[in-house]
Amino acid sequence: MLDILYEDDALLFVNKPPDIVVQRSHDPDEPVLLEMAIAHAGNLFLMQRLDRGTSGVMFFSKRADINSKLTRQFETKQIRKRYLALCEGELEESQTIDTLITRVGPIKFGVRDHGKRAVTSIVSRRATPRGSLVEVELRTGRTHQIRVHLAAIGHPIIGDWLYGVRNAPRPMLHAAELAMVHPLTNAPLRVLAPPPVDFWKVAEERKIVSRDEDILTAAESS
């Protein structure tokens, strides 16, 4: 069942659950988010993607005539995405990482003829010896960019089986917010997605966020 965050005649925003693919791949029987969204709203255009293990806000276009405007917003960085991640270790220093990165992830430090530039801003919100809550904003969009960059500075995402350790159900990465200009009204549009239960559970078990706190509030006010 879709968790609808915002919907109008032009756009559909949903809160993607973890461990569901956005588009169908090889398994003919697994649930697919795009197909679920189409069953709800009819014909849709996929404007972005999230990895299978990443949860959070993503949107679809309902109208072909607005897609060029949305693409332009992506190109000019008017569409902003804010992520929350639980990472290993005590990450206290906020920083911007600017490196070259290959398509599948490994970083090429100081090599100017391999990979593409990848820029990630990381803001530390809660830092404990057992793990940290960080807020992440992408300045570029490379495959696995957040996962690669956090691993590169010694703080891989908790549960990241590819760049860290498989010690959680999935990589604890959540797309918490998407902000844009509405393509029809030109009004600012900001949509938030609360983290799922597994994200909150790991944060509590690691004593990064206490039981009586809201993770989104903790990230915004820390």
Image (spheres, rainbow, N blue to C red):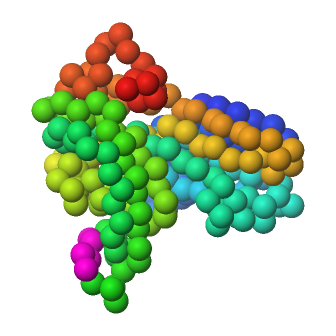
Counting from the top left corner in percent of width and height, residue 144 is at: 37, 60
Q: In which quadrant will I find the N terminus? A: top right
Range of residues picked out in magenta: 106-110
Nearest the camera: 23 or 113?
113
Counting from the top left corner in percent of width and height, residue 216 is at: 46, 27
197 to the left or right of 187: left
Residue found farthest to the top: 212
Residue at x 68%, y 47% (from the top left corner): 180
Counting from the top left corner in percent of width and height, residue 82 is at: 50, 44
Q: Is residue 204 above or below residue 172?
A: above
101 to the left or right of 36: left
62 to the left or right of 176: right
Nearest the camera: 47 or 112?
112
Counting from the top left corner in percent of width and height, residue 143 is at: 41, 65
Reply yes or no: does residue 109 show up in magenta: yes
Residue at x 65%, y 32% (from the top left corner): 5
Residue at x 18%, y 30% (from the top left corner): 128
Residue at x 27%, y 84% (from the top left corner): 111
Majority secondary structure of the magenta segment? loop
